[in-house]
Amino acid sequence: MFINFALIVVILSFLELLVTMRVGSILGPRNAFLLMILSGVLGAAIIKIQGPLLMKKLQDQLNQDKMPSGALLDGLLIMTGAILLLIPGFLSDLMGLLLLFPASRIVIKYITRNKLQKFFKSSQSKPKNSRKRSSTHYDDIEDADFH
């Protein structure tokens, strides 16, 4: 699992570097750098504004005895998008912007919800104690008086 994660991080970092170099060659290094700074500032502003709004929305839904699953997933996607904008690079910015736009977020929310439902259904169907019992059973031993 760790090797897969490390491999994904290395590949994404390499792709991020390639895309940044390409954008820098098109826009010029100074403009590319300023664009990355601007996206970081935008991400920080979104977190600062949306964080308290999300907490208020969740609190309101909980006060009305409603389960805030939709608002929770929306907020999680928005915060993830804002964090991706904070990461320097254009590939992460693109992924972050996709999470911020409501139209693309609907599709991502649908996919995420289905994956989570499948995950929880599969984890509930597995037996809790999946180990085989040893061949030595002590269930059938009756109580005896030991003096």
Image (cartoon, rainbow, N blue to C red):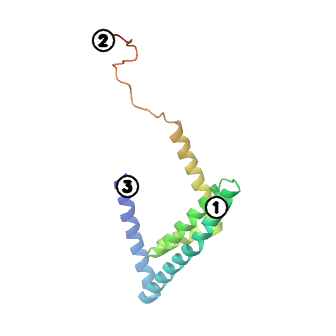
Toward which corner of the image does residue 63 lie, by quadrant? bottom right
Extreme residue in the right direction = 64
| Image location of residue 78, percent across then percent down | 57, 67
On screen, residue 143 above or below 96: above
Q: What residue do we see at 54% from left, 79% from top?
A: 42
Residue for badge 1: 59
Find out whether the residues at labels 3 and 1 contact each other: C-beta distance under 8 Å. no
| Image location of residue 92, percent across then percent down | 48, 71
Task: Tell me if I can see residue 104 in this picture.
Answer: no
Q: What residue do we see at 65% from left, 64% from top?
A: 57
On screen, residue 146 above or below 95: above
Toward which corner of the image does residue 6 lie, by quadrant? bottom left
On screen, residue 74 above or below 90: above
User: 133 or 52, which is in the foreground?
Assistant: 52
Q: Secondary structure at mark 1?
A: helix
Q: Secondary structure at mark 2?
A: loop
Q: Which mark, residue 4?
A: 3
Q: Secondary structure at mark 3?
A: helix
Q: What residue do we see at 38% from left, 57% from top?
A: 5
User: 90 or 44, which is in the foreground?
Assistant: 44
Disc 2/disc 3 C-alpha distance (Å): 57 Å
**Amino acid found under the numbered disc labelled 1:** Gln
User: 99 or 76, which is in the foreground?
Assistant: 76
Q: Which mark, residue 146?
A: 2
Q: Residues within 10 Å of mark 2 (few under 14, many from 20)?
A: few
Find out whether the residues at labels 2 and 3 contact each other: C-beta distance under 8 Å. no
Q: Give the left or right position of residue 64, taking residue 21 as reference.
A: right
Which badge, 3 or 1, is on the more N-terminal residue?
3
